[in-house]
DNA sequence: ATACAATCTGATGTATACAAAGTACAAATG
DNA sequence: CATTTGTACTTTGTATACATCAGATTGTAT
């Protein structure tokens, strides 16, 4: 009798398949749909108030994104997130964000600069208030602004997708308040490196920034994994 | 009255949607389905001898891969490949293949080494015979072996996907026979760098290798674009 | 002849119906 | 009592039917 946060937002002027896609993805990324959970079409269709067709089309996309795995003649289930998997994602993400900031150093436009400064300010004010949620979203926005400044559309898509894979863990490295000042300074250095056009410095700081995140996330994962080992699944 | 190479391979034990997916993707990547061409469901369904449902599900995947673009209430069409687009892809691919070879330097296993050596030999024998097709596929296999040796599954997926985006142009930098010896030596250096574990050297040679490809492809693209400007579409 | 409107066509978007296959459970048999 | 087989049920895979919308075409009025 759990409450059903999985609701389609009918206000959007999108095909149902896209609404369902977004809904399911959000459910998976927030952890409402748990890894290993089966995604049965009729069930979801009833729950979301649509027919099986849009559900299936949404699942096809989630499948390609790697968020669900298909078992032939059995159906879809939420992909399991392993430590290895996350490490792989972070490794790739580090390379791509490094590329992004290097490209940004070369190509940043005045508009990008303005946007980036704005996001930086938001990170800093959020960090001062200590509001984890605000820091997390400002952090994401800041990184998005950097990737945007790279001018590479495909890169933007990929980084955004990889970022979403870790949505669930975005708070982990922010929770530790003692790190807030460090986070702030890292962001400031990134910003300055870009303005200076110092690619080497920029790439280095991005790498350490993501490494810090990785450590925090890995700690969390290990903890989750241990917990999962104890309690049997319902 | 053009011949219809777009045929589903019914021998495969896969859901029709996957067969259709592969078929359409192959059609797009080989250029049989031309950029801008509309993909109408009923037509494709008749042509491939299946119903609309598998067609639609295949299109959803192609959509997420970026191979087709959806126009609301109008349908799918083969994505246009612009010069900018290809540049973006190659930029990302360069970063990811660099990462792959660096990781391979650290993590390569004896089995990986053996496979890599085998592919290298295949490249060299193919280069000596001058068979462009053989060189192209051996080249792909060699790079795949490197990425495989990185031990990063996500990276493997991404590189493979990006590689497919440029399937059409894989011959371009091989056609020029005067470059064959250069290609061979580049591959050998990559191989040796990995064995030596020299990440810097490995990354550098991969970058120049891809840069060379990029030049050849860009020349080709420009030529295609000019040609398209002259002849009107039928 | 041109502009505008109504209609008609053909495509997508969505729902449902039907087929096939895998699984679980129960009954029968050794 | 265990094992095997058969049957029913659940769920996916595929096809088709229905709804809706956008664009084209045709007809009419100015």
Image: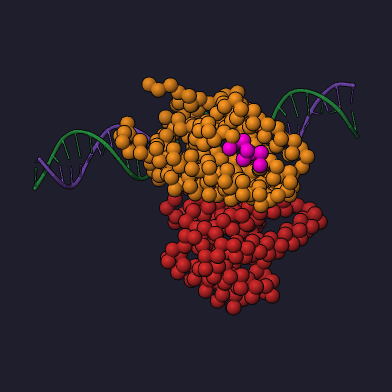
Chain colours: A orange, B red, C green, D purple
Residue at coordinates 44% horizontally, 63% vertically from top-left?
Answer: B109
Name the residue nearer the viewer: B7 or B77. B77
| Residue A179 located left or right of residue A36 | right
Residue at coordinates 39% horizontally, 37% vertically from top-left?
Answer: A223
> Is residue B136 among the parts visible in the rendering?
yes
> Is residue B172 among the parts visible in the rendering?
no
Q: Is residue B32 above or below residue B66?
A: below
Q: Quadrant of residue A110?
A: top right
Q: Which residues are magenta?
A: A182-189
Q: Check residue A184 for magenta coloring.
A: yes
Q: Quadrant of residue A71?
A: top left
Name the residue nearer the viewer: A214 or D11. A214
| Residue A103 located left or right of residue B59 | right
**Residue A175 percent across, percent down from the top left:** 51, 32
Residue at coordinates 46% horizontally, 46% vertically from top-left?
Answer: A85
- Which corner quadrant holds the N terminus of chain A? top left
Number of numbered discs overlaid on the protein picture: 0
Q: Is residue A34 above or below residue B12?
A: above
Q: Check residue B107 for magenta coloring.
A: no
Name the residue nearer the viewer: A132 or A76. A132
**Residue A232 percent across, percent down from the top left:** 30, 34
**Predominant secondary structure, magenta span:** helix
Q: Is residue B108 above or below residue D1?
A: below
Residue at coordinates 63% horizontally, 32% vertically from top-left?
Answer: A123
**Residue A10 percent across, percent down from the top left:** 57, 24
**Residue B162 percent across, percent down from the top left:** 59, 53
- Which corner quadrant holds the C terminus of chain A? top left
Q: Is residue A211 above or below residue B140?
A: above
């Amino acid at each position: 009798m759990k409450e059903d946060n999985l609701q389609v937002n009918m206000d959007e002027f999108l095909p149902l398949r896209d609404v369902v896609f977004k809904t399911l993805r959000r459910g998976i990324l927030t952890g409402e749909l748990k890894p290993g959970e089966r995604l049965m079409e009729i069930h979801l269709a009833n729950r979301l108030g649509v027919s099986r067709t849009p559900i299936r089309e949404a699942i096809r996309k989630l499948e390609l994104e790697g968020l669900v795995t298909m078992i032939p003649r059995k159906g879809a289930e939420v992909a399991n997130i392993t430590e290895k998997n996350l490490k792989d994602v972070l490794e790739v993400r580090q390379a791509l964000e490094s590329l992004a900031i290097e490209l940004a150093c070369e190509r940043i436009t005045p508009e990008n600069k303005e946007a980036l400064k704005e996001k930086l300010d938001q990170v800093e004010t959020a960090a001062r208030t200590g509001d984890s949620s605000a820091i997390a979203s400002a952090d994401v926005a800041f990184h998005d602004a950097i990737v945007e400044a790279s001018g590479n559309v495909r890169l933007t898509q990929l980084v955004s997708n990889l970022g979403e894979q870790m949505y669930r863990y975005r708070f982990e490295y922010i929770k530790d308040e003692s790190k807030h000042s460090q986070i702030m300074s890292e962001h400031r250095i990134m910003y300055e490196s870009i303005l200076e056009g110092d690619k080497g410095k920029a790439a280095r700081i991005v790498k350490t920034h993501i490494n810090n995140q990785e450590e925090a996330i890995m700690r969390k994962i290990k903890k989750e994994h241990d917990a999962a080992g104890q309690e049997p699944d319902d």
